[in-house]
Image (cartoon, rainbow, N blue to C red):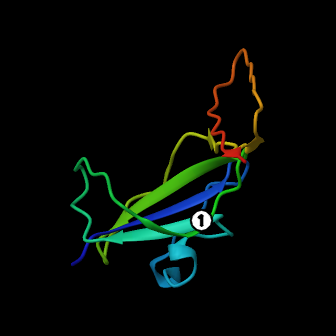
Amino acid sequence: MANTLYFAAYPSAASTPTWARGDIGTNAGFSGTPTMYGTKADAPATGTDYEPTITWTGSLTPGTPYKLVALWDDGANSSAVFVGEVFDTYHLIHLSSPTTAEIGATTARGRVTATEYA
């Protein structure tokens, strides 16, 4: 049977979702309303280090905390739903020229991409 990885991103405050093979056509089988979801067919067997390239459905909002969930399935058996650590998406800031931006933080890290417009 083909091994498939199922992924979804949820707002960080959302409860851990459930997954059902019979619901694969909806949100890749995950319950609730994930912000994004995707699958990767032909995944290796469980216990293998693997970095998949995934095509996602949906998009994330900058500056919002999310968590990723994943599940491995071979068409007959599936793993438990794994939940990753909460992460924040980056903010994209466009600055008019010439402008200098200074961002300070004591406990947070961030990245600023500045695009100069003529």
Rate crowding at label 1 as few (under 14), some (14 to 19) or many (20 or more) other CA atoms within 10 Å.
some
Q: Amino acid at mark 1?
A: Met
User: Which quarter of the figure is the N terminus placed in?
Assistant: bottom left
Residue 86 percent across, percent down from the top left: 61, 41
How many callouts does the rendering have?
Answer: 1
Tell me the quarter of the picture where residue 36 sits. bottom right
Q: Residue at x 29, y 72 (%)?
A: 74
Viewer can see residue 92: no
Residue ID at (62%, 55%): 16
Q: Quadrant of residue 10?
A: bottom right
The residue pinned by badge 1 equals 36
Q: Residue 118, position in %: x, y?
A: 72, 48
Residue 46 seen: yes
Judged left or right of residue 78, residue 89 is: right
- Left-right relation of 12 to 29: right
Q: Nearer the viewer, residue 111 or 9?
A: 111
Q: Is residue 25 above or below residue 111?
A: below
Name the residue nearer the viewer: 34 or 90: 90
Q: Position of residue 22 (x, y in %)?
A: 48, 84
Which residue does the image show at 53% across and 82% down from the upper left? 23
SS at mark 1? strand
Front-lying residue, 21 or 9: 9
Q: Which residue is the extreme one toward the top?
A: 106
The residue positioned farthest toward the front in the image shown:
118
Residue 69 versus residue 93 in the image, above or below: below
Q: Where residue 53 sits in the image (x, y, percent)?
A: 36, 61
Using the image, determine if residue 33 lies above or below residue 85. below
